[in-house]
Image (cartoon, helix red, strand yellow):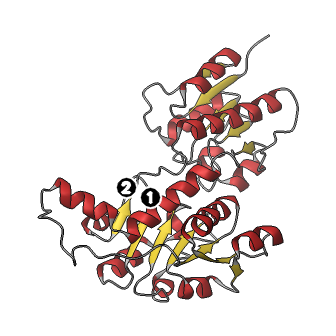
Amino acid sequence: MRKPKVFITRKWPASVEATLTALYDVTLNEMDRPLTADEFKTALQEYDAVCPTVCDTFPADVINVTNKRCKILGNFGVGYNHIDINAAKQQGIIVTNTPGVLTESTADIAMTLLLMSARRGAEGDRIVRAQQWHGWCPTHMLSTDVTGATLGLIGFGRIAQAMARKAHHGFGMHILYYNPSPANADTVANLNAVRCDSVDEVISRADFVSLHCPGGAETKHLINAARLNLMKPSAHLINTARGDVVDSQALIDALRNKQIAGAGLDVYENEPDIHADFLKLDNVTLLPHLGSATLNTRTAMGEKVLANLAAFFNGKEPMDRIV
């Protein structure tokens, strides 16, 4: 019996690639190079399944390519705003993702960014490496306390709740959140969390604002110049959600003008082409999209894709189907 043909757009953990090789007629991206739109179109025409990552863009003009063979996009990642979901639905292509398994690792990175931004960690590292540190001084690199501060969360899904748990129980932080619907009562009670009526209320009250909302048209530039202006001058913005949730130029202006104290970013608009002005600022911590980057988490994500593919090719409903 012919094995289904599967195309993997980027390099995955070795154990997952070994399973893919055993189960399918698979093409791997051994060089781990970014692929072009034309290569994605060809993959859709020649393979039964294509497995993109969050750095691979599948707009309508790619998905609508003629003579398609592909029937499922097994996305390696939770976010799927890089895929035109409406086009996939119209073309009868199933799209799956990998929720649940990257909650803790992404929340860990959000807390890492919060701590680094608050305590000027990245700036201090640069000073030491540049041999510009001349010894301890009572007023050198004074920063912001984290313990007992107020953390405001925009969105209150799994990752936000995991961050809130680490922040509240680990650092005694007070938790505010905005979410369109109220959270589970037991979760709220455990975190002593307070639901705000709007994004603006969270932003104006919090010492640290952490973004945990989905990307896409509805949240593009949710954090803009007007909202940055609502933040305390001592506040920090943390983004591990999606790059386009933040207006990059507005954030750069706010940081440059000391309108807010700092920011910690793991995601960016148009990544990996980061706005060059971010690199000129000392009060921003920049990480290369490390949210889920632990071996255990990335392996679990790959295993989620494997499970979704197995269900599909066995005529069953994939557990993580989006459309």
Q: Nearer the viewer, residue 5 or 46?
A: 5
Kind of residue indicated by mark 2: Asp
Which dot marks residue 3? Answer: none
For the residue labelled by badge 1, is the local secondary structure a helix, a strand or a loop? loop
Q: Is residue 253 left or right of residue 109?
A: left
Give the residue at the far top of this rendering. Answer: 1
How many residues crowd around disc 2 within 10 Å: few (fewer than 14), some, or many (20 or more)?
few
- Where is residue 234 shown, x and y percent of the image? 40, 84
State the image quarter where residue 6 is shown. Answer: top right
On screen, residue 176 above or below 41: below
- Where is residue 264 shown, x and y percent of the image? 42, 65
- Residue located beneath label 2 in the image: 273
The residue under the point 27% across, 69% down is 282
Q: Nearer the viewer, residue 302 or 59?
A: 302
State the image quarter where residue 122 is shown. Answer: bottom left
Asked if residue 122 can be seen in this view, the reply is: yes
State the image quarter where residue 19 is shown. Answer: top right
Q: Is residue 68 left or right of residue 220?
A: right
* Structural distance between the alpha carbons of marks 1 and 2: 6 Å
For the residue labelled by badge 2, is the local secondary structure a helix, a strand or a loop? loop
Q: Are marks 1 and 2 in contact (CB under 8 Å)?
A: yes
Counting labels gives 2
The residue under the point 39% across, 63% down is 116
Which dot marks residue 270? Answer: 1
Q: Is residue 60 left or right of residue 145?
A: right
Kind of residue indicated by mark 1: Asn
Asked if residue 68 can be seen in this view, the reply is: no
How many residues crowd around disc 1 within 10 Å: few (fewer than 14), some, or many (20 or more)?
few
- Where is residue 47 shown, x and y percent of the image? 66, 27
Image quadrant in which the N terminus is located = top right
- Where is residue 299 shown, x and y percent of the image? 60, 34
Q: Nearer the viewer, residue 160 or 245?
A: 160
